[in-house]
Image: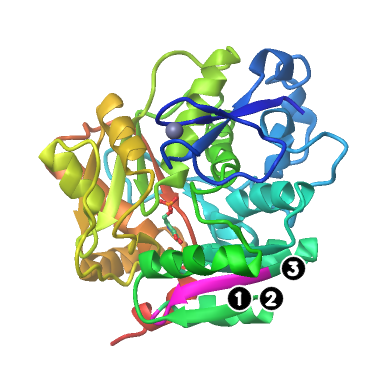
Amino acid sequence: MFLKRLECSACGLEHEWSRLQNLCRSCNKPLFAIVDLAAASYTMTRETLLTRDKSLWRYREVLPLPSDVEPVSLGEGGTPLLHAERVGNDVELWIKDESSNPTQSFKARGMSVAVSMAKYLGATKLAVPSAGNAGGALAAYAARAGMETHVFMPRDTPRANVVECRELGAHVTLIDGLITDCAAEIARRKANEGWFDMSTLKEPYRVEGKKTLGYELAEQLNWRLPDVILYPAGGGTGLIGMWKAFDEMEALGWIGKNRPRMFAVQAAGCAPIVRAFEAGEKNAAEFQNAHTIASGLRVPKAIGDFLMLKILRESNGGAVAIDDEEMIRVAREVGVAEGLFVCPEGAACFAALKLLRSAGTIASGQRVVIFNTGSGIKYLEAYDAD
Ligand SMILES: Cc1ncc(COP(=O)(O)O)c(C=O)c1O
Ligand SMILES: [Zn+2]
């Protein structure tokens, strides 16, 4: 294993990786895993990757977990990058279809890595606040690992997510409130209950799993990153993870200095990052009365807000809000045109592409990647409303 240490993403304070960690003990911001890339590069090269399985554990050298420990895996990662045949119009559009992951969303990536590490470091009971898909993914990986899981979700989370968690053996608590209220409930109870908090970015390894989105994308595009990435951002873990992957790949000598322009796509009813981006703020204020059918985007306050905003600005990207009716309409368009039943979060990115094209923010001919982060099948109430 080439994990060296954990480092605070805000103040740089070092933390040991060899015990369970949540936030920085000095400033309460997220911790990042620092990997010895020079050592990793002896065995993991662009050529050796060609011979490996397609699961995200193909990038084992840049992931945590000692090399003699078996990961908790259900075959996550290795998802298709599909060329959009019709909806791209005048850009070269690619869709990274994450719905083919275990439990049908990209949350599987983070949970495979984070549950593997939590188990290795001795956790026995896990807890997570979830907008829906993260809970399902944690329930699956914890079941696989033989661990106890507690999932806290808003009462109006899509039914499929709730049923899935229960069927996978998780203890499910429905809260009258938002994901932030679920997180507060876990924070209040975790010490007494002996739960390890698996909240995104409050635990250092979900972002490591999500960074494989960046490695896979580069590999599938033959090590030439796209001009633009559109990502549906709630907590922002995928965005932050991909950005980390790009820096690591540059250090490995696999890609150059150029970065895609990164766009965060949010729901009009919950757009804290869009607001903060437009106001030139470094942090995002909590978004009041958050509501959207794109449950994964119903995150009124994200602990990684400052990291997301930095990436959007450094990459000359931006942030776009889409309303729910448009997501539903565009999801049907994508379904008919491309044969993909996308989640509302993914649909929002297609709608954002249209907006950015008509505003001229994205030029014609650009190579654009959209992340369809999950399957529409989990959102039947939203799609079957009429
Ligand atoms: C389908 C889907 N897309 C996007 C997101 C947002 O992900 P992130 O927290 O990485 O921003 C979520 C989170 O729940 C989700 O379930
Ligand atoms: Zn710190």
The picture places residue 236, in percent across and down from the top left corner, at 40, 47
Alpha carbons under labels 3 and 1: distance apart = 10 Å
Residue 50 vertical placement versus 101 (above, below): above
Question: Which sits earlier in the primary sequence, circle 3 or circle 1?
Answer: 3
Circles 2 and 3 in contact, beta carbons < 8 Å: yes
The residue labelled by disc 3 is 143
Ligand 1, what quadrant?
A: bottom left
Of 108 and 2, nearer the camera is 2
**Going by the picture, which residue comes out furthest to the bottom?**
386
In magenta, the rendered stretch is 149-156
The residue labelled by disc 1 is 165
The residue labelled by disc 2 is 168
Disc 2 crowd rating (10 Å Cα; few below 14, some 14-19, many 20+) is: some
Tell me if 169 is positioned left or right of 190 in this view.
Answer: right
What amino acid is found at the position of numbered circle 1 in the picture? Cys
Q: Secondary structure at mark 1?
A: helix
Alpha carbons under labels 1 and 2: distance apart = 5 Å
**Total marks placed:** 3
At a point 26% along the width and 46% down the height, the residue shown is 353
Q: Secondary structure at mark 3?
A: helix
Tell me if 185 is positioned left or right of 297 in this view.
Answer: right
At a point 65% along the width and 45% down the height, the residue shown is 78
What amino acid is found at the position of numbered circle 2 in the picture? Leu
